[in-house]
Amino acid sequence: MQFSSKEDIEAPIDAVFREITDFQSFERSALRRGAEVQRTDALDVPAVGMSWHARFMLRGRKREMDVELVAYDPPNGIELEARSSAVLGRMRVDLVALSRGRTRLSVDLNLEPRSMSGRLLVQSLKLARNNLSKRFRLRIADYAVDLEDRYKRSA
């Protein structure tokens, strides 16, 4: 199952890349939402091989997931892989400079079942595909607006 979204951001590509690779900010955000997140690598700077272990509630059940940074291409984008016992997820974030002060953010999320319970989960997501796709696009749009606002405040 795949979700995709594109947004244009009024900020230079380097500033957008710096924001999408602010992994500590994402960790704090997940913690505020009730997830438990723990770094599982020893890297000092963002690079391929960064990894996290996360525990969170989803659809009424406690879930666990390992997340790894599998591609790191400054300032063009990143790719993350998330593995659980039921589902494998890959999220690719691509950046394209439209001009010196404008960047296109493209986010693609692909979910693949790894077990029978994963198949049931993905199948139930497919039944709600239109609603979930709309929510995904709205979340990416909100993130783009927040990113733009942070850039304007810091400039």
Image: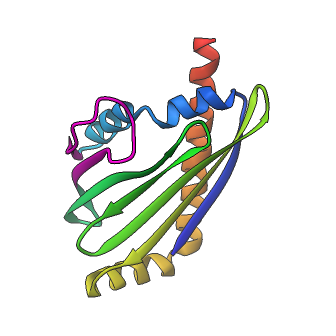
Relative to 58, is 72 above or below?
Answer: above
Q: Is residue 59 magenta?
A: no
Q: Residue furthest bottom?
A: 116
Q: Is residue 116 left or right of residue 90?
A: left
In the rendered structure, does residue 50 fall within the stretch colored magenta?
yes
Q: Quadrant of residue 81?
A: bottom left
User: According to the image, what is the colour scheme of the structure?
Assistant: rainbow
Give the camera-side residue of 117 and 128.
Answer: 117
Q: In which quarter of the image is the C terminus?
A: top right
Q: In which quarter of the image is residue 146?
A: top right
- Residue 151 is situated, as x and y percent measured from the top left of the image, at 61, 21
Residue at 50 percent across and 37 percent down: it is: 20
Residue stretch rendered in magenta on the structure: 35-55
Residue lying furthest right in this view? 99
- Tell me what residue is drawn at x 59 percent, y 71 percent: 130
Percent from the top left, x then y, of residue 17?
A: 56, 34
| Whether residue 58 is situated above or below residue 43 in the rendered picture | below
Image point (46%, 36%), residue name: 21
> Is 60 situated above or below 48?
below
The location of residue 89, given as percent across then percent down, is: 40, 66
Q: In which quarter of the image is residue 105?
A: top right
For image coordinates 37% across by 37% down, the residue present is 26
Q: Position of residue 54 (x, y in %)?
A: 23, 51
In-image side of 137 versus 33 (left or right): right
Between residues 36 and 93, which one lies in front from this camera angle?
93
